[in-house]
Amino acid sequence: MAGVHVLNLSSVEGVITNAEGVFEIAVQAQDTLYFSYLGFKPLKVPVSNDMIKFGIPVFRLTELSFALEEVIVRPYQLTGYLDIDVRKVPINPAGRYSIPGLPSAGYEGGNRNRSSISKALGSLFNPADFLYNLFGKNPKQMRKLKKMREDDAIKALLGTKFDREVLVQFLGIDRINLEEILRNCSYSNAFIKEANDLQILEAISGCYEEYKILQL
């Protein structure tokens, strides 16, 4: 199969199979390979000494079957008058707040109420919150964020995915904790639901960098 993403979860490297389904990636015993292809079940394979010593293995992916429900798509009923039609465009209700001295474009507070501003500031400056517990106690996982952002194959894959599965595998945390990180960084539920995996990676990375600045 051509175009399969093959990721080494241990070394945080990724490659894509060629037209014949062949790939090369550096591995060591105890590493874990992760195969991802749209429409197929992801495959997770631990690398053994025998695999390295006795030959090139062949991996097979299993096609997924989906039972889709009926979806009704309704276009916007536009009138042709801009001042009327613009009111029909859905708006993300999340307010964003920037903090001088930090490099971020801003924080999503969830809505535009005054209480959301306190939430954005409180999640940053409270040293006992979930963000501190995760970033402070898991430096190894957080170092993987930087390596993921530097690998073009990994970024290309994340840009097409919305299921958070690759992020969960790399960081070693479950999806609930992943979403909790974003909430503690004051990202809105709309962003958490609709962003692709690459946007989620950038959001967590930016939040982590700002966390480090605040700890200095």
Image: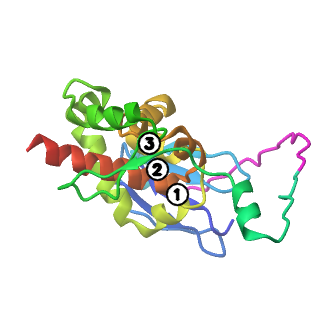
Between 10 and 201, the one nearer to me in the picture: 201
Amino acid type of the residue tagged 3 in the rendering: Tyr
Q: Is residue 178 left or right of 119 when viewed as pictured? A: right
Q: Which residue was labeled with disc 1?
A: 158
Q: Which residue was labeled with disc 2?
A: 200
Nearest to the eye among marks 3 and 1: give it: 3
Q: Residue at x 83, y 71 (%)?
A: 80
The first of marks 1 and 2 along the sequence is: 1
The first of marks 3 and 1 along the sequence is: 1
Task: Answer whether labels 3 and 2 touch (C-beta < 8 Å).
Answer: no
Helix, strand, or loop for circle 1?
A: helix
Q: Position of residue 107 (x, y in %)?
A: 37, 47
Task: Answer whether labels 3 and 1 touch (C-beta < 8 Å).
Answer: no
Q: Residue at x 50, y 44 (%)?
A: 94
Crowding around mark 1 (Cα neighbors within 10 Å: few <14, some 14 to 19, many 20+) is: many
Q: Residue at x 60, y 49 (%)?
A: 162
Q: Which residue was labeled with disc 3?
A: 187
Amino acid type of the residue tagged 2 in the rendering: Ile
Quarter of the image with the N terminus in it: bottom right
Crowding around mark 2 (Cα neighbors within 10 Å: few <14, some 14 to 19, many 20+) is: many
Nearest to the eye among marks 3 and 2: give it: 3
